[in-house]
């Protein structure tokens, strides 16, 4: 009988330790989905990882978080891809899951049956984007359970998700950040005129975006005062906290950062340039995730001195937030030769065709090896404070 499907009360802590020692493969829980507007983006990355991960080395448990927040045991056979223009969602018919906060064990919960243990997980790969996943929440849950996981910890994840605090930390660390205004919920409700004036004082155009969302969800490029209020309301559908940023002219360049396996400083990839296809006013959701919306030039056609400066600033941003595992740092390179940090993503898009993996592939680290590197980094990191 497969030990993973024994009733949970039949497996004690000694049995769990034996379970880990007797396995020839590392058990990896790949977690995806989530309760936010980036649910489908997460599934796209999970589909790529499930396809590329070394099955001879890793035993994979796919776990989906449904849009209502339920955790379910997902199928490895499900196709997580955009088909006929439709975005994928987590199949909610799988067995419900629970993670006891005192161990790394997964327990399956099926109505009318005794809960059964799926065995102890060695490491979690949380391919989650946006609130309730990328923002430190799942990282906190896994910390309490003593489970190793891929990527940054609670604080770095939370700062990286909240663009307002991210910019504060980056600026305090001496990194160049563009002008912006934070629109908080109370200020918008009680002093809207002041908020609109401060945002307008940035000059036109501006970008209005949710402070805690990604994948270009809820972003509007606003060209004059007439469209500002509507754009803020649109962003507030995703997050009551909104950011208004001055548009920075220039090229969009990006650099991926990877934690070192030893005690060396983090490593930076080659620099890439995002070129948005005609028909997209900026690097929006459709440009990012639908075929033909953008091209990534990697390495970017930049002077060597500029590329080296981008790579150095990317590592500086990574360390300013205390990131672990991986990140992608986005910049504007202005016509005057200035580099401005736009943002850092602690769990960037992670399909094989996403920017960060493609940057690493161009650097000489193919996608399957990148997955392996991230898991090995997580396994080396002790649970708890570090």
Image (cartoon, grey):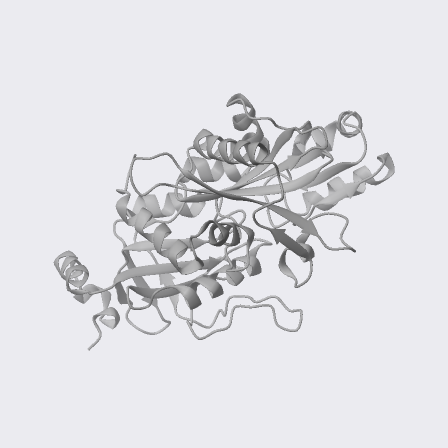
Say which residue appears at 37% left-offset and 47% top-offset. 141
Q: Position of residue 288 (x, y in %)?
A: 64, 55
Taking depth in this image into account, of 110 and 43 the one nearest to the observer is 43
User: Compared to 165, does 98 lie above or below?
Assistant: below
Q: Position of residue 261 (x, y in %)?
A: 31, 43
Q: Position of residue 153 (x, y in %)?
A: 39, 40
Say which residue appears at 72% left-offset and 39% top-offset. 208
Quadrant assignment for the C terminus: top left
User: Compared to 64, does 255 lie above or below?
Assistant: above
- Say whether residue 21 is left or right of residue 196: left
- Say whether residue 122 is left or right of residue 90: left
* Residue situated furthest front in the rendering: 304
Q: Position of residue 174 (x, y in %)?
A: 53, 22
User: Compared to 282, does 323 lie above or below?
Assistant: above
Quarter of the view holding residue 292: bottom right
Quarter of the view holding residue 294: bottom right
């Amino acid at each position: 009988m497969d030990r993973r499907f024994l009733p949970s009360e039949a497996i004690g802590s000694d049995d769990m330790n034996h379970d880990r020692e007797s396995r020839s493969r590392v058990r990896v829980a790949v977690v995806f989905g989530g309760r936010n507007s980036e649910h489908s983006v997460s599934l796209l990355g999970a589909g790529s990882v499930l396809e590329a991960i070394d099955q001879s080395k890793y035993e994979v448990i796919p776990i989906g978080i449904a849009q209502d927040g339920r955790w379910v045991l997902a199928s490895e056979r499900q196709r997580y891809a955009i088909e006929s223009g439709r975005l994928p969602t987590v199949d909610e018919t799988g067995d419900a899951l629970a993670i006891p906060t005192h161990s790394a064990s997964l327990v399956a919960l099926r109505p009318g049956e005794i809960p059964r243990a799926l065995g102890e997980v060695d490491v979690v790969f949380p391919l989650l984007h946006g609130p309730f996943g990328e923002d430190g929440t799942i990282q906190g849950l896994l910390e309490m359970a003593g489970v190793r996981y891929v990527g940054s910890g609670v604080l770095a994840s939370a700062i990286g998700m909240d663009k307002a605090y991210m910019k504060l930390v980056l600026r305090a660390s001496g990194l160049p950040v563009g002008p912006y205004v934070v629109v908080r919920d109370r200020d918008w409700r009680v002093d809207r005129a002041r908020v609109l004036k401060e945002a307008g004082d940035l000059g036109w155009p501006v970008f209005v975006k949710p402070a805690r969302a990604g994948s270009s969800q809820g972003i509007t490029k606003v060209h004059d005062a007439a469209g500002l209020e509507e754009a803020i309301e649109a962003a507030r559908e995703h997050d009551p906290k909104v950011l208004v940023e001055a548009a920075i002219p220039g090229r969009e360049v990006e650099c991926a950062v990877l934690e070192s396996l030893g005690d060396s400083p983090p490593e930076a990839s080659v620099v890439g340039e995002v070129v948005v296809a005609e028909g997209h006013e900026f690097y929006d959701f459709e440009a990012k995730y639908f075929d033909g919306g953008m091209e990534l030039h990697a390495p970017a056609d930049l002077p060597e001195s500029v590329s080296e400066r981008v790579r150095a600033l990317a590592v500086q941003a990574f360390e300013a937030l205390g990131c672990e595992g991986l990140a992608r740092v986005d910049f504007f390179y202005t016509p005057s030769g200035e580099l401005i940090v736009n943002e850092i993503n602690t769990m960037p898009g992670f399909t094989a065709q996403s920017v960060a993996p493609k940057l690493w592939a161009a650097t000489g680290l193919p996608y399957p090896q990148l997955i392996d590197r991230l898991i090995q980094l997580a396994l080396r990191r002790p649970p708890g404070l570090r």
